[in-house]
Image: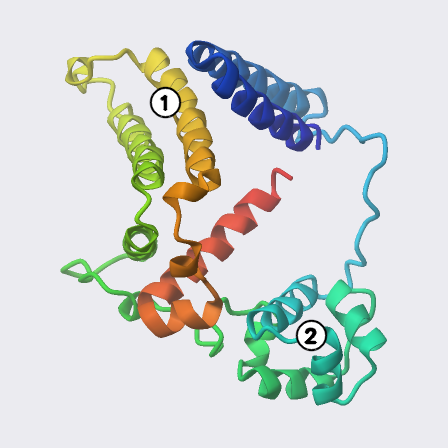
Amino acid sequence: MILKPFIEIISLSIELIRNLQPNLTVFFCRICQFTIRYVFLYNKYTAGNFHEIPLVNPLPERNNNMNNDFPRILSLLRSEKQLSQKQAAEDLGIAQALLSHYEKGKRECGLDFLVKAADYYNVSTDYLLGRSPVSTGALLTENDIPEGAPTGKADGFSFSSSLAKKLIISSVDVIYSLLNKTKNKKLAQSISTILSLNIYKSFRLIYKLNPKNDKNLFVINEESAFRAAAAGELLAESAALAAINDSSANSPENIEITTATLESEYNKQAAALLNLIRNSENTIKKYE
């Protein structure tokens, strides 16, 4: 879709302007927001749906019959265990070329290899196949996540919103725990800004539901608020990337993250985060 390369170009432009002319960044972000909005609407309404405009060199389509998660997770597990492809292939009893094909999604494995790989990496087959974001393959329920459940009998909507709330709260707890390990104040400030602005926008959308709600609760009018919040998010993301690239402010050895370390240190909160990641990427895929 045209939006993906377009947004990547905008992100790079913002970083360049931020370094060369900081005073122009907010103005540029606002222009970008309007442009993205109109490109998005154009794509949507010119075809009655999310119209895709082909790129000069489109990527080849994947075989829809193949599991797209298995190659990624198989490669991830080997990387997290710090194993060479040659070593893993020997341990699994297959040729390195065949393992390479499995990890790149060029070949499908049989059931025997699936079970052998699950035992080798000490994970469930459901995790290997992407059916569960947790290595044990456990299905996450509301009662598995920290934070008390709502009182009284819950209908389907209440249960769904309560589960989403728990996923978000537990994930934020993990994020701030990891931020604390980085000792990077600028990164923490930038991520806090991103989270705060999203909560702000969410509240304003709920507040807008009833036209009788007094708009004087807010200092900034609605249209300006959403434009500026979007610009603020882009700026905060740019500042976060700058903080990450500032080697003098980082201690990367304190922030080595794997699925195993997350599950070991954060247990059910990690399960919530991994589920939130999967749900978010399922949403993102719709706009790729």
Residue pictured at 32% horizontal, 68% vertical: 266
- How many marks can you see? 2
Q: Nearer the viewer, residue 109 or 11?
A: 11
Q: Position of residue 64 (x, y in %)?
A: 77, 58
Could one spot residue 88 in this view of the protein?
yes
Q: Nearer the viewer, residue 107 or 98?
A: 98
**Which of the 4 image quadrants contains residue 48?**
top right
Q: Position of residue 269 (x, y in %)?
A: 32, 64
Indicate which disc residue 84 carries. Answer: 2
Element type at mark 1:
helix
Q: Position of residue 165 (x, y in %)?
A: 29, 51
Q: Amino acid at mark 1?
A: Ala
Q: Is residue 25 above or below residue 67?
A: above
Residue pictured at 49% horizontal, 75% vertical: 135
Residue pictured at 65% horizontal, 18% vertical: 42
Q: Is residue 124 above or below residue 182?
A: below
Q: Amino acid at mark 2?
A: Ser
Task: Look at the numbered discs 2 and 1 and tell me whether their residues touch, using CB distance below 8 Å.
Answer: no
Quarter of the C terminus within the rendering: top right
Q: Which residue is mark 1?
A: 229
Could one spot residue 112 in this view of the protein?
no
Relative to residue 102, is residue 35 drawn left or right?
Answer: left
